[in-house]
Amino acid sequence: MSLFYVGHPRETDLALFAGGELGPLSRWRIEKHLQSCEPCRTAVADFFHLQGDLEELSELPSSVDWAGMSLRIFKAVAEAEETQSEPVRGHFFPKPPAWQLGLATAAVICGFIVVRQFPLPVAEDAVITAADEQKAVSRGARTLEGGGALAPGVSAASSESFSKPSSRQQQRENQPLSDVDAVIPVRAVERAEMLAMEEKRAALAARTGASPPEDRMRAVARPEAEPLRLASDAQAHESSRVGAGRDAVSEADGRAANISATSAPTGPLGAQRKDAAMNLALDRRVTGRGILREELDQPIGGKKKASAGELRRAKASSVPADRQPVSQEEQFARLGASFAMQIAGVGASIAPPTDGSEIVVDVKTDGGVRFRRVDAATGRITITDVYAQ
Amino acid sequence: MRNKATAVLLGFALPAAFAVYSLTMCRAVQAQSVSGPATLWQDPTQAVHVAITSDIPLSLVSKDLSSTRVQIMGAIMMVDLKCRLEVRNESTSFLRGVVMGVVSAEHSPGGKASVALPSLNIAPDDTTVLNVDLKLVRPFPSNTDHAVNVDIDGALFTDMVFRGPNEFDSRHKLVVWEMEAERDRRHFKSLLASGGREQLATAMQASVQRQQQRPRLRAELEQQLRKLISPPRPLVRRERRIQVSRHHFPESPLEIVSGSALVEGSRVRAPEITVKNRSQKPVRWYELGWLVSDGDGVRYTAGLMPAPKGRSRLAPGAEASTQSDHSFVLNRGGAARGLSIGRMSGYVRNVEFEDGIVWIPTRNDLEASSLDRATPVSVEEQRLTRLYGSQGVEAVIAELAQF
């Protein structure tokens, strides 16, 4: 039975589910749906195996017209702003007070129900708020928007989906992916971020000398330049990565590769971009999934983001001493080991230990994998079958 | 009038609908959410559940999960599962093998695995230790009572007596491994009887050398389907379809009729092999082996090709096709990674008839087709050669005497 689903979940939801990035409610709904839907299980399996291909996402083509893309985005943001400034005149709703009353009543009822449903306190690091999920979704949606200009580098299948979205597709992509999330205008967030960026750039220009106005304009117009600016500021960089999701990671990596490959601008802005590229390159020490997990591990919600040190201390206080990880690097090393197995063809969330034991791997044509491992201590042989479905 | 109706609708019906919707959603969230804070799930005894089905004559003597580590990172739960189970053989027969099912996320790909310990020889009323050592990554929170369920899916005793729920095809796997073990023990026993310990030692050394010199290949599953963004690739693939040659075993109940695959460099896509049941009995399950040769004619084992899913029995004379829509990239690892696939071949690894009888190729079959140089040795041969390497030929003779 497809509980709450008429038809099938969206492909983006399935992709997020496969990556373990959905909220609890969405995951529960999709799990229920997958129990009875073979095509969606297959789709999830396909997406799941895609995790091993994350490395390829950094190989964005250097021939992309970034300036043109940024101008188009800037133009779209301006248009959206104009549209939003006009009040909504719904001829369907002749009595605004009744509508407002209804909404207010619904909000109170919903709030009451929500409070009643969660009497127990839940650990902070186990909760993903709707607002944070929305942030991730917003950034994901922006990445999809940007994908339209990546036509030279995308495959036929991807360009079919993202290269030239129709207005209806565009609208759908901008919608929040989670059904319980509050609606936050994506373009408003982008605009606010760009305004903040503009202010900071103006201050920087005032300190270090004037930069060409067209460069400033381009930097303001390009939302994708935002992480480059933030990379020069450690805390802001941290916050930019929170909730960014895998698309943002690959987006940042791709830009870093692009900047290093193409001619870097001169002057202070150019220096900033070089710094940013170096920062992003350092992040590549960790796998893409590692970065993603770090993002998910951040305290989330409307409050200020915690620093890495605060995060470590919070973790240490919630984990028994004998089970505390040695360091965050160790966690990432483990993650890396697990996902390295995926890249090696395992394609599974279950992997045998990579402790140097003798392992014989047999890939099955149905997508499963068989490991034969000899325990060095006992000489006993263990055979592990990991199933694709 | 219309405006009033709309106002009533919006004022009362809409909040009511919202309330019902919110209530439903909250119930769903509550059902999904954990029954306590995240720290509870970091307790292995809460996260991992171990059970033995009542119809399996094994009893759980002790369970040690103290080395298991559970870490929760946002919406991800990482379980470094180190489960040590001590079980007692409560039957009157020797225990030959055990398969444990490990389920972390049943409906997610890769969320299910089985861990098998073949080639055991546990006497009645004796105990043995079963170790499960896996790394699991699964979404958090869990919508089940336990993040990981470990169950004994089947146990094989002497005379091929199987007990257990068999949800992971444990019976078939254990019987195949046990038959291979019997075959190889018989072979080494005959060498011992005919040529004494020297000949057994020579055979052990030859086996060790063969295992070391076996050409290794790393097969990677390539997912070109549903790729969101991928690096530029040529629009025109230069794939060529090659026919799969067959290794014929005279006694094999299945015959490989035809087979093909699309090959481009070291990439193989959509391998397909059709087999025909030439025996007089219906076949329930079979497994094919798949080899590739490079330009120099060196053969490598590429992987397993299980029977098609949702299969029905293969009647005598009937044909069945094993297909895969996956794409595989094969490489040799190390510096000389590149591999240009020249030929492909297939062979029948094992067949299970409807009556439960299992067929495996003989050692003569494998040697005659030189498959023994390309395919991995059996679990039992590997175990015996390791015993030979660590304790010498006398230990192997003593081990063979126990069977």
Image: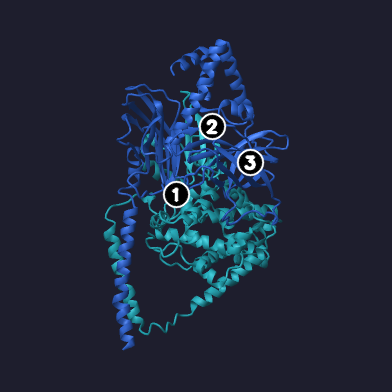
Chain colours: A cyan, B blue
**Residue tagged by mark 2?**
A359
Viewer-proximal residue, A12 or B367? B367
Residue A234 x/y as whole percent: 53, 51
Tag shown at residue B166: none
**Residue tagged by mark 3?**
B330
Tag shown at residue B108: 1
Q: CA distance from mark 3 to mark 1?
A: 26 Å
Residue drawn at point x = 30 percent, y = 52 percent: A121
Q: Quadrant of residue A364?
A: top right
Q: Quadrant of the N terminus of chain A?
A: bottom left
Residue furthest to the front:
B280
Q: Say which chain tag 2 marks.
A: A
Q: CA distance from mark 2 to mark 1?
A: 25 Å
Q: Secondary structure at mark 2?
A: strand
Viewer-proximal residue, B147 or B288? B288
Q: CA distance from mark 3 to mark 2?
A: 17 Å
Q: Say which chain tag 3 marks.
A: B
